[in-house]
Amino acid sequence: MTEDAPKMFSLRLSGDGINIEQQIEQRLALQVVQVVMGGGVSGPAAPPLGASHSAPPPNSVQLSLREHLDKIGASKKPEQIVTIAQYVCEVEGQGDFSRDDIKSRFITAREPPPGNFSRDFAVAQKNGWVAEVHGKKSRYYVTAKGNQAINANFSNGKGAGGRR
C-alpha cells in the first residue's frame, strides 16, 4: 500500500547569467534529456519510467578521450585543453569543470601535459573557447565559440596562439 518515493535527479543549468541547481523527479528529468538530445518535448508523455539514457544511442560508438583528441586533431595544448573540456562536459556528463579536472585527463589520454598549463589555459580563455561559470569561482564551461572551433577541427588557420 505504500507508494515508492519518486526517483530524484539533480539538475544543473549554468551559462551567461543563469545558474540553476535543483532536484527534479525522474519523469521531468527524462523530458529534459529528451529536449537536450534534440527530440523536443512530446507533450506530457515522457519516456517510460524505467528507460535508461546512460547508454549511447544504437549505431553510435563511444570514443575514448584519446580517440576524441585524435579525431578532433587537437595538436596545440590550448586546443587539447578545450577538447578535453568538451569531452568532460559532454561524454562524462559533468556540467562544468575545474582546471584540475583537465590536468588529470592529460594523464588519462596518455598525452604529455602542458609545460605551462596556466599559460595554455589562459590562451584557451583568451580565444573565447572556455569561460568561468558565473557565480562559481574556479569552475568553467566550453563556450559556443569553443564548440565551433572543435567542430571545425581548429581549421581557422590561426591555431591556438594566432593573432586577430
Image (spheres, rainbow, N blue to C red):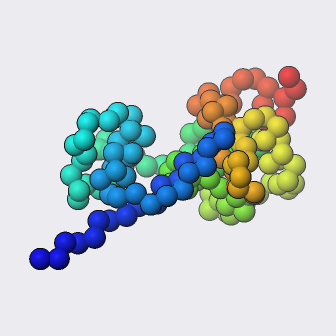
| Residue 83 shows in the view | no
At 71% from the left and 52% from the top, the residue drawn is: 135
At 86% from the left and 22% from the top, the residue drawn is: 164
At 23% from the left and 59% from the top, the residue drawn is: 50
Extreme residue in the bottom direction: 1
- Horizontally, residue 87 falls left or right of residue 27, namely right
Nearer the observer, 16 or 108? 16
Nearer the observer, 115 or 31? 31
Residue 148: x percent and y percent?
62, 29
Residue 158: x percent and y percent?
79, 26
- Horizontally, residue 163 falls left or right of residue 141, namely right
Image: 60 above or below 139: above
Residue 107: x percent and y percent?
67, 63
Instruction: Locate residue 136: give its quadrant.
Output: bottom right
Residue 66: x percent and y percent?
58, 52
- Horizontally, residue 40 falls left or right of residue 140, namely left
Extreme residue in the left direction: 1
Nearer the observer, 64 or 35? 35
